[in-house]
């Protein structure tokens, strides 16, 4: 079996239509955030591990200058097709997210996370945090919908709220994180919406 660190693993999931993390729409908590009085001001935005692009398209529709990044060519093609059908102006780029700092250092006002962090192996998490910090501007913000569960194996790999805070606290203010009440049924009471500002 291919390791989850291989692009082919994720490409195969899309080819076989077994990308069960894709819910066929933007995440409801992210949609609620952008429709609320707490919505962030539009800026340049990276959607990390964007899948088929639903969350990326959501942010682009709200005026964010958005780039969706994904390992799998099929995911990028699906996102491009969907955004073109909806006449949404944005980019989708096939990239290894851990190599983004080489190309996009300090480039983004926002990084968006939803079901990417939980898909990488736990030993890669410190590198993930460093990558996010590296691509954000000094005033940047990570907007994340973390899936925190305790089921064994993966992907998705389990994590606790305390582990999330510990991982990100060296580079981000982790005080703004809370449970959400409008997750999809299969993730009910397991998701947290975080808005982590870069520490100065």
Image: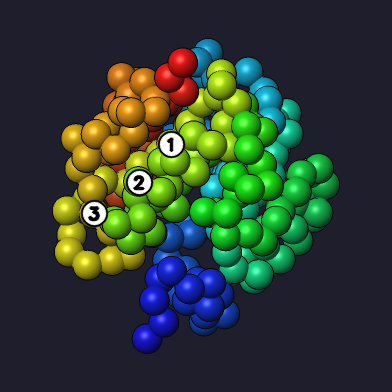
User: 43 or 95: nearer the eye?
Assistant: 95
Query: Which one is earlier in the sequence, the residue at label 2 or at label 3?
Result: 2
Task: Look at discs 2 and 1 and give the one toward the viewer.
Answer: 2
Q: Residue 123 at what x, y percent from top left?
A: 29, 57
Marks 2,3: beta carbons within 8 A: no
- Could you tell me which quadrant the N terminus lies in? bottom left
Dot 2, how many residues are within 10 Å of its Cα: few (below 14), some (14-19), or many (20+)?
few
Callout 3: helix, strand or loop? loop
**Which marked residue is nearer to the observer: mark 2 or mark 3?**
2
Residue 52 against residue 193 in the figure, above or below: below
Q: Is residue 126 above or below residue 13?
A: above
Rate crowding at label 3 as few (under 14), some (14 to 19) or many (20 or more) other CA atoms within 10 Å.
Answer: some
Residue of label 3: 158
Of residues 129 and 156, the one nearer the viewer is: 129
> How many tags in the picture?
3
Depth check: 103 or 195 in front?
A: 103
- Residue 43 drawn at (x, y percent): 68, 25
Which numbered disc flags the more N-terminal residue, 2 or 1?
2
Per the image, the residue denoted by label 1 is: 144
Q: Residue at x 43, y 19 (%)?
A: 199
Q: Are marks 2 and 1 in contact (CB under 8 Å)?
A: no
Which residue of the protein is positioned furthest toward the front in this rendering? 102
15 left or right, relative to 20: right
For disc 2, the marked residue is 126
């Amino acid at each position: 079996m291919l390791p989850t660190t291989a692009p082919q693993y994720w490409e195969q999931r899309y080819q076989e239509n077994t990308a069960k993390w894709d819910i066929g729409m933007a995440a409801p908590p992210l949609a609620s955030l952008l429709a609320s009085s707490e919505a962030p001001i539009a800026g340049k935005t990276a959607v990390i591990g964007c899948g088929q692009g639903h969350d990326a398209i959501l942010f682009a529709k709200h005026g964010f200058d958005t780039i969706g990044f994904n390992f799998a060519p099929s995911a990028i093609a699906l996102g491009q097709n969907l955004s073109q059908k909806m006449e949404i102006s944005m980019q989708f780029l096939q990239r290894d997210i851990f190599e983004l700092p080489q190309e996009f250092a300090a480039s983004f006002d926002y990084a968006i996370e939803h079901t990417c962090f939980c898909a990488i192996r736990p030993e890669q998490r410190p590198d993930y945090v460093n990558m996010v910090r590296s691509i954000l501007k000094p005033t940047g913000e990570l907007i994340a919908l973390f899936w925190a569960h305790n089921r064994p194996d993966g992907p998705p790999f389990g994590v606790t709220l305390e582990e999330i805070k510990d991982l990100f606290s060296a580079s981000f203010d982790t005080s703004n994180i809370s449970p959400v009440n409008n997750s999809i049924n299969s993730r009910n009471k397991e998701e947290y919406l975080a808005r982590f500002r870069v520490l100065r």
